[in-house]
Amino acid sequence: MDIQLKRGLLDACVLAAIKDEDSYGYKIIKDMKPYLDMSESTLYTILKRLEAAKMLTVRTAEHEGRLRKYYHIEEPGLKRIEEFKEDWKEIMAVYRFITKEDDPNE
């Protein structure tokens, strides 16, 4: 898969994972597990990139005696999810064009 396309997909997945409530690394990975496997190193690289782009913010809170980082989506992150949904329509149109010869009904 094209690296830029994959990066966009993974960024959108992480943003979607924290869209409805703040979350932390392990829970984000667990929530995405039914849909895709992501390593912790990949996740934290994405989280840092999204934080640098101001799509999310981070707060630290104590949980069971340990510090945990919680991620919160910001307006630019919500906007990116909406942009992704629009982009996806175009991607699917291209997919249908590319695979039309595979469909005997076309």
Image: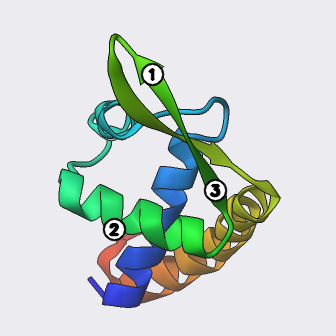
Check disc 1: other Cα within 10 Å, few if <14, some if 14-19, many if 20+.
few
Residue under the image location 48 percent in, 75 percent down: 8
Mark 3 in CB contact with mark 1 (< 8 angstroms) = no
The residues tagged by marks 3 and 1 sit, at their Cα atoms, a distance apart of 20 Å
Q: Is residue 100 visible?
A: no
State which tag comes first along the sequence, 3 or 2: 2
- The residue under the point 51% across, 28% down is 61
How far from the left and from the top, in percent, is residue 101? 35, 85
Q: Quadrant of the N terminus?
A: bottom left
Cα–Cα gap, marks 3 and 2: 13 Å
Residue 34 lies, in percent from the top left, at 29, 34
Q: Which residue is denoted by mark 1 in the rendering?
A: 62
Residue 19 position within the rendered picture, expressed as x and y whole percent measured from the top left: 65, 41
Badge 3 crowding class, 10 Å Cα cut-off, few under 14, some 14 to 19, many 20 or more, is many
Q: Element type at marker 2?
A: helix
In this rendering, does residue 84 appear at all? Answer: yes
Residues at circles 3 and 2 in contact by the CB criterion of under 8 Å: no
Q: Residues within 10 Å of mark 2 (few under 14, many from 20)?
A: few
* Amino acid type at image mark 1: Glu
Which comes before the other along the chain, label 1 or label 2?
Answer: 2
| Residue at which label 2 appears | 45
> Where 74 sits versus 98, above or below?
above
Name the residue tied to disc 3.
56
Looking at the rendered structure, the kind of residue marked 3 is Leu
Please tell me whether mark 1 sits on a helix, a strand or a loop. strand
